[in-house]
């Protein structure tokens, strides 16, 4: 069964390499024909230096190669997912569509599988998420992820099709919990990066991670997620990774805020839009998410680091 990956960024390319090395027929698609020709010629993606793309990965700019696959991994940013699904609705109809992004749509406050369902009702939506860096996956380093699909038989098929000797997938039917874990940890990672960048220390970061995890659980439970999901790979596991490594784009963006440095915004930072979307959602639901609200204000430039710190530290004392 051929797997197509729509999106030749670092993560999409890494998945293509991992699956191809495991003997899977893989098509890697990008809309930019010039970029595709470069990838075909050099067999290397500049976003994954030192990683060779095997010759048996079919790299293409023809969307028909994506339509021909039964399983399609959508390696596009969260804020671009709805547009992509809308533009390619007919060609993706009836496919097993696996979103590989982590975020909440700013316009509709929907997660990836909800977007797929609303735009392509005949598709089987799923989500691939969890603690991972593209470079680790591409180099064959041991990585464990979550494949979330409400259709459990389809989830089993995806788990078997996408697992490799070094990429181990765990299955869940709780798409809500998996989506929120992957999305919300990006917001907390920005907060932790800002904390370290401003020199506030590791103890403060540990507090932000812990209280941030409480916020993740609070919102997820309100929206119907299963309690155990947030303590798994797609929640706590991803939170630990992205809040402690400068390889995380969200954490690095937070570092730049704390250090008052510029940041290359060509790089997608999913947590920025997600912080704004979740803040709106929390207000609608009447849920208190103080760290998320502070991150949204920091990203908009409406708070300084010292103001953000004072906002959080001057909150009323309470039980944990």
Image (cartoon, rainbow, N blue to C red):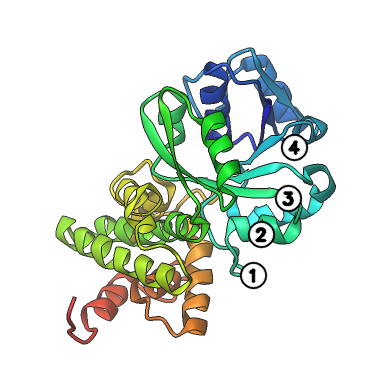
Calculate the distance from the C-alpha at mark 2 to the C-alpha at mark 4: 21 Å
Give the mark nearer the N terminus: 3 vs 4: 4
Marks 3/1 in contact by CB < 8 Å: the verdict is: no
Give the mark nearer the N terminus: 2 vs 4: 4
Q: Which residue is drawn at 34% across and 50% down?
A: 232
Q: Mark 4 points at which residue?
A: 31
Q: In this view, does 70 lie above or below 42?
A: below
Q: Name the residue under label 2.
A: 115
Q: Residue 177, located in which quarter of the rendered image?
A: bottom left
- Residue 48 vs residue 62, the one in the foreground: 62
Direction left: furthest residue: 203
Image check: 118 left or right of 267? right
Marks 3/4 in contact by CB < 8 Å: the verdict is: no
* Quarter of the picture holding the C terminus: bottom left
Give the label on residue 108, or none.
1
Calculate the distance from the C-alpha at mark 2 to the C-alpha at mark 1: 9 Å
Q: Residue at x 15, y 59 (%)?
A: 203
Calculate the distance from the C-alpha at mark 3 to the C-alpha at mark 1: 15 Å
């Amino acid at each position: 069964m051929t797997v197509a990956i729509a999106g030749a960024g670092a993560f999409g390319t890494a998945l293509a390499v991992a699956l191809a090395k495991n003997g899977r027929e893989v098509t890697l698609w990008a809309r930019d024909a010039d970029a595709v020709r470069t990838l075909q010629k050099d067999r290397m993606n500049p976003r994954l230096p030192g990683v060779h793309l095997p010759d048996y990965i079919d790299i293409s700019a023809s969307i028909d190669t994506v339509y021909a696959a039964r399983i399609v991994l959508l390696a596009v940013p969260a804020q671009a997912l709805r547009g992509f699904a809308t533009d390619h609705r007919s060609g993706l109809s009836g496919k097993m569509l696996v979103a590989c992004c982590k975020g909440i749509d700013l316009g509709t406050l929907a997660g990836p599988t909800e977007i797929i369902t609303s735009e392509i009702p005949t598709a089987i939506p799923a989500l691939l998420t969890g603690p991972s860096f593209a470079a680790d996956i591409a180099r064959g380093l041991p990585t464990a992820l979550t494949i979330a699909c409400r259709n459990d038989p389809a989830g089993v098929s995806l788990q078997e099709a996408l697992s490799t000797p070094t990429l181990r997938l765990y299955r869940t039917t709780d798409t809500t919990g998996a989506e929120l874990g992957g999305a919300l940890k990006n917001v907390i990672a920005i907060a932790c990066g800002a904390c370290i960048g401003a020199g506030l220390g590791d103890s403060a970061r540990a507090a932000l991670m812990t209280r941030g995890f409480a916020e993740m659980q609070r919102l997820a439970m309100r929206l119907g997620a299963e309690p155990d999901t947030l303590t798994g790979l797609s929640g706590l596991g991803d939170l630990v990774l992205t809040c402690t490594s400068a390889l995380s784009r969200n954490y690095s963006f937070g570092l730049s805020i704390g250090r008052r440095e510029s940041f290359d915004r060509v790089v997608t930072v999913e947590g920025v839009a997600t912080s704004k979307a979740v803040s709106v959602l929390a207000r609608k639901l009447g849920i208190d998410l103080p760290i998320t609200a502070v991150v949204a204000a920091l990203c908009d430039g409406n708070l300084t680091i010292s103001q953000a710190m004072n906002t959080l530290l001057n909150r009323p004392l309470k039980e944990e």
